[in-house]
Image (cartoon, grey):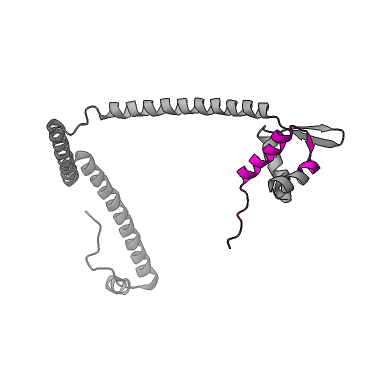
Amino acid sequence: MSKKRGLSIEEKRTRMMEIFFESKDVFQLKDIEKIAPKEKGITSMSVKDVLQSLVDDGMVDTDRIGTSNYFWAFPSKALHARERKLEELKKQLAEYTQKKESLQENIEKSKIGRQNTAERAALTKELTALRQKKDQLKLEIETYKECDPDVIEEIRQANKVAKEAANRWTDNIFSVKSWAKRKFGFEDSKINKTFGIPEDFDYVD
């Protein structure tokens, strides 16, 4: 035998509202905690939470008198609350319907000029060809970039800087060789061989 399914939160809320509507009375929490499990099958542990959710939603009124809290709800108020909710939902539906119509209108407008006509197909083909031509021209520009006067000037300046740097190091090496010959009496050939300096080592022209 299958286990009996417990009440959902909405079923509990509905049954608790029945307590107020059927009696048209005012209750304390302790009264509800006694009535709800016995008459409506709402577990005692959930009574307080269910009641509070109804208070939060404005379906049940509450007031503190002395040291006690009292709760009540009348069908007329519930009816007005439902009517207000219905009006709110109708308003939202009207707004969403208007938004939907506006979006549909924009979609239809955006389709204008985009039909798959022979002219559109030809223009699309031409656009694709032009894009391919553009990519080809970009490759050709890169190929001939070295002929650009600005690029050539940059290369010339870079060569000049490199040449000056190379000759400075050549100066330094010749200075070290001269010092070594004076200090230790080494010959050029021995210094060149020891330090791997080519025999034709000289300044860059």
Q: Position of residue 55 (x, y in %)?
A: 70, 35
Q: Residue 8: x percent and y percent?
A: 61, 47
Q: Quick check: is 17 in the magenta stretch?
A: yes
2 over 185 or under it: above or below: above
Instruction: Point out residue 164 in the picture as x, y percentages from the top left corner.
Output: 30, 51
Q: Residue at x 23, y 68 (%)?
A: 199
Which of 114/183 is in front? 114
- Tell which residue pokes out farthest to the right in this image: 66
Residue shown at 35% from the left, 59% from the top: 172
Q: Is residue 25 magenta?
A: yes
The vertical placement of 166 against 62, above or below, is below
Q: Residue shown at 77%/33% (left/top)?
A: 25
Q: Is residue 21 above or below residue 176?
A: above
Extent of the magenta region: 4-32
In front of the other: 182 or 189: 189
The quadrant holding residue 22 is top right
Q: Quadrant of the N terminus?
A: bottom right
Q: Quadrant of residue 115?
A: top left
Residue 152 position within the rendered picture, expressed as x and y whole percent measured from the top left: 21, 43
* Side (left or right) of 87 relative to 165: right
Q: Residue at x 58, y 26 (%)?
A: 83
